Each structure stands twice: as structure tokens, then as C-alpha cells.
Image: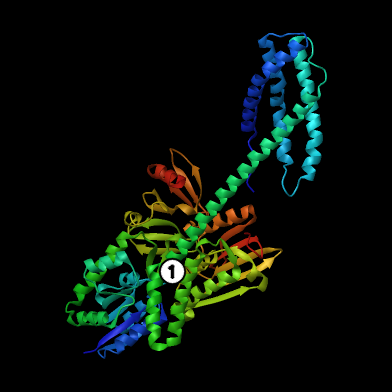
Amino acid sequence: MEDRSVPLARIWLVAVACFTAAALLFTGQVWVDFAYAGRPLSWGLALAVALVDWETWALLTPAVVLLAQRFPFSRASWRVPVVVHVPAGFIIGGVKLTIEAVLTRAILGYGRTPFSFLKIYLTLLTYWAIVAVTHVARSYRDARARELRSAELETALAHAQVEALKMQLHPHFLFNTLNTIAGLMREDVEAADLMLTKLAELLRRTLETADVQEVPLEHELEFLDAYLTIQRSRYGDRLRVSIEASEQARQSIVPSLILQPLVENAIRHGIAEKPGPGRVDLDARLDNNRLVIHVSNDGPEFPPRIREGFGLRNIRSRLERLYGADASFSLLGKPGGGAVASLNFPSRLESPS
Amino acid sequence: MTLRALIVDDEPVARRRLRTLLESEGTVEVLGECEDGSAAIDDIRRSRPDVVFLDVQMPGLDGFDVVDALEPAEQPAIVFVTAYDRYAVRAFDVHAVDYLLKPFDRGRLRKTLGRLETLNDARDAARRVHAAVESVRAQQPLRRVLVRSIGKVYAVRLEDVDSIQSAGHYLEIHTGSATHLVRGSIGGIESRLDPARFARIHRSVIVNIDRIRELQPTFHGEFVVILQSGRRLRCSRTYADGLKQALGS
């Protein structure tokens, strides 16, 4: 998770500015108080006493902000924060009044009114005001972070969609597919018909996932089926595909359009580059509430280090934004040739609204 | 007179479609079909077709590799077949080499057959095909090196190459498991390699940057380059700066 806390230095600077303004406003009140008590002060000393009163808070603000961040109020949890902040308000307030009394005595040589309810209320009120400001700053930050994350997710999905469309409209794929349909029409009308409808389905599904971040795996597998039906017709016996997914895995939610680039890569590097037959295997299962998906091929030997293309980088960035550090993605060579791409992230049954 | 044709394509339906179209013309005899480049080279040498319908994109050796591997004297008329390849198509146009864009119709195929009938100088046609292949190759960074050994031709993928060393008129291509010998010069191959992936480290040595494990400085600004395979190569001072720059990128 990203750090949601508000930077202390900035909030402290704002606090000092506010307290200084308050001290200026209260200087008149201090002057009047002392005049009525029969010990009139110069304006300079009145300002000094008011500054001592308010800037004492500047010393204590970091402690209050830290407490407010550690025990934030929210709809779900308010009991613990109340239990913490009520006594903390009295304790920190007490510390504040003590420091203030000592400093004031040092300046004037004598103390202010030893006891005043108004003073205590004002002190408690200030404590709660700092807690409230911290809370607001924090909520604002959260909202901004959420907005940013959702904008980034939208961009990544848009990229995935563009990649998927590019794959389908890629001249090699499209024209070879059309050529296969033209050939099948002479020898097997049913097969030609199937291939045309799968091509249409592929295009339609890609266009329709425009703004859906996550879909059940089942949905992705149907999409893959359309794609693989076409590829199998093109490559004939050379392409062998097996897809195994448990019933629970099929119901799990996955980022949309996440499998197609992996399978496309597996075919491109496995089958399209190597003479003779090749396999692509997809395996999806639940393991300890995590969805684990492997896409592998038996293509040529995998180079020890590869440069990841746009498709792979996009998968990585979407997983990171959707699941944070809780998702992993790897692409590794298999001993004896071929590669396996592995996805591993928390399994959910429903997409969050 | 019948035209004896060979069809080379890695997609079975595409081969059958072309065969059906050719056979229905009545003037063409289809000798056979091949699904990859090396089978095509064998078949061309064995059955000596008049014309080969050659798919450009194929696994292993592609259509251009097939042309490369054949001596001009043994090369039949070539009709390239491709789904899409902007650069190649431009080169075919420039060198007046015939090609078909998939999917093509019967009319377009007849035009090609008509051209083949009027083809009177086979050597000139072979020369133009080679020129077209060369000009396509010059525009694309090298992806594979074609190795001709006794009785077979095969391709070594550049991502499998650790280093390349010159040895007289030949180049030794070192991969993890083997050394392949091809004709060529170090300067010639260097100009066709992606400079982000391969770096010259010596008058006679090029390395795959991704395979470098470490650099050990020696004397006078020279380095020993140690590859992941454990192989040690000397990097001379002339190339040291270039290598460091390539590694930094």
C-alpha cells in the first residue's frame, strides 16, 4: 500500500502560521486581562505572553498529528480513537498549560490567572482542532490518491485494449486469417463459418471490454477460445493447446485482457518461430485463496535475459495498480526449451464496485 | 507446356487453397508442399521445380533464407507469397519480382502465371530475386545468422549468440553450446547488428551485451570481458569507451 500519512513538516509549518496569527489576535485580550487584574503590561510584553500561549502548541503539534495519524477516526472505527484521544487531549493539554505557565513566569516574573475554565476549554478545543485538521488533510490525500490510481488503471486498460485490437488488426493475423477462411470455404463450409464468427466475436469482445477493469476468468477464457480457434485453424496440427481451469478459478475475477497477450506471445515465440508442432498450455487454479495461472509453451530455448515488450510491461503495471505488492508476474525459461509465464494474485469472486 | 510448381507455406489451409487454385488452371502441376524453409531447400534441390510459391514468414528458415541458401544456378522462378510486409513488397516492386498478397484472387494468380510463361531469362529473374532479398535484409536489423554446413542449412538466432569472432574469411559464431562457422567479415556483420545489443570489443570480436557478466580492468585502460558462460575475452582500449557506453544504456 502507498504511504497515506500527511507529511509532518508541512503540517507543522501551517500550524506555526496559524498559531502566530492567533497570538496576534489574542494580544489585545492579554493586554485587557492584565489591565483588569491591576497589572497593566506594555503591548510588547502582551504580545510575548500571547506568543508563549500559542506557540507552545507549535511544540506539541507533531505529537498530536502523529497520534491523529496513528488513531484516525473513520466510520468503521471510532471507539478506539475516542478512547485514545479523550485522555490524550487532557494529558497534552496539561503539558501545554504547564510549559506555558513556566515560560510566562520566566518572562514576567509572575504568573497569569492560576486557574480558568475558559483556558482549559480553549486548550482542549485546540487539541481537537489539530486532530480534525489532520483528519481532513488525510482524507483529501486519500481521495487524490484514489483518483490518481483509478486514472492510471484506466490508462493501462486502454493500453491493453489497444494492444488487443492491434493484435487482431495486425496485418499478419488478419490477412492470414482471411486467407484461411477463403481456403476453408472450398473445403469445409462449416469450418469457414466458425472461423468468421470467431473473428467477429474476438473483435466485438475487445471493443466491449472498453471500460471493464476486471472480469471473471471464464470471460477471459471465452475470449481466448475465439482467438485459439482461429489460430488452430491456421496452424492445423502444428498447434496443440490445452486449457485447464478449475471451476473455482473460472469464477475468480481477473484483470480484463490479461491472458491474451501471454497466449499470443506463447504462440508467436513457440509455434511461429519453430518448425514442427508446438504446444501451448494454460493452467489456472486456486491455491490458498490465490489465483495461480501458468501459460507455457515448448518453443525454442529461452534467452537468459529478455527485454520485456510493451505488452508484458503493461501486464506488470496493471497488476501492481490493482493489487499492489500482493500480485506477482514472472516469465521464465523452462529447462529444455520453451517458457512459462506465471501470474499469482489474490482470488476474489466479485468485482468491487 | 505445364509448369511444375512447389508450394511453401507453414499454414496447411493456405497451402491447400493455393494448390486447388493452381490445379484448377490445368496448366500447372503441383509437385508438392513444404511447411518450412529447410524442407523447401531439400525439395527444390531434389525435384527441380520451375516455380516456387514461397511464403515469406515461416518458422525456422523464412522465405528469404531459402533464397539465400540456394545457389543462383539452382534457383527456380520464385513467387513470394505474403500476408503483409511493407518493406518486402516495396523491394519486390523495385526489383520487378513477382509476389502475391494473401488472400489473392484467381485473377491475380492468373496474371502471375502469365508472367511466368513469358519469363525467358531465368538467370536474370534469379538475380532480381536476390537483389530484392538483399535490399529487404539491409533495411532490417539481422535477427538470425544462416549457417550452411554439409548437407543442411540452419539458422542461429541472435539472442542465442554469446560472441562473434573473426577467423580469416570466416566468422565463428559462439552460442552457449556450440560454435558455428559462417563466411563473412566482422565489419560486415557489425553493421547489420543492433548496436544496443551487440558491441565490438576488439578488432576481431563482437559480444552480446546481455551476456556480459563482468568487466575486469587490466592494464592501460583495457578490460577483460567475462561472459555468463565463463568465457573471457579481451576488450582493447580502442573499444573500451564504446563498450562502457553500451553497458550503461
Judge whether A284 appears above or below A197 on screen: above
Q: Is residue B69 left or right of residue A195?
A: left
What x and y, as percent, mark residue B45? 32, 80
Q: Is residue B43 visible?
A: yes
Judge whether B216 appears above or below A208 on screen: above
Please name the residue shown 44% across and 71% down the image: A272
| Type of colouring | rainbow
Between B41 and A273, the one nearer to me in the picture: A273
Mark 1 element type: helix
Please name the residue shown 58% across and 57% down the image: A319
Q: Which residue is mark 1?
A: A168
- Please name the amino acid that badge 1 sits on: Gln
Q: Is residue B104 left or right of residue A41?
A: left
Chain hosting mark 1: A
Judge whether A94 appears above or below A47 on screen: below
Residue lying farthest front?
A36
Quadrant containing the C terminus of chain A is bottom right
Please name the residue shown 36% across and 59% down the image: B141
Please name the residue shown 41% across and 76% down the image: A177
Q: Is residue A5 visible?
A: no
Between A234 and B202, the one nearer to me in the picture: A234
Between B167 and B72, the one nearer to me in the picture: B72
Q: Specify few, some or many for label 1: CA neighbours under 10 Å numbering under 14, 14-19, or 20 or more.
A: some
Q: How many marks?
A: 1
Q: Is residue A300 left or right of residue B8?
A: right
What x and y, as percent, mark residue B181? 39, 64
What x and y, as percent, mark residue A284? 62, 69
What x and y, as percent, mark residue B90? 26, 65
Q: Is residue A16 left or right of residue B185?
A: right
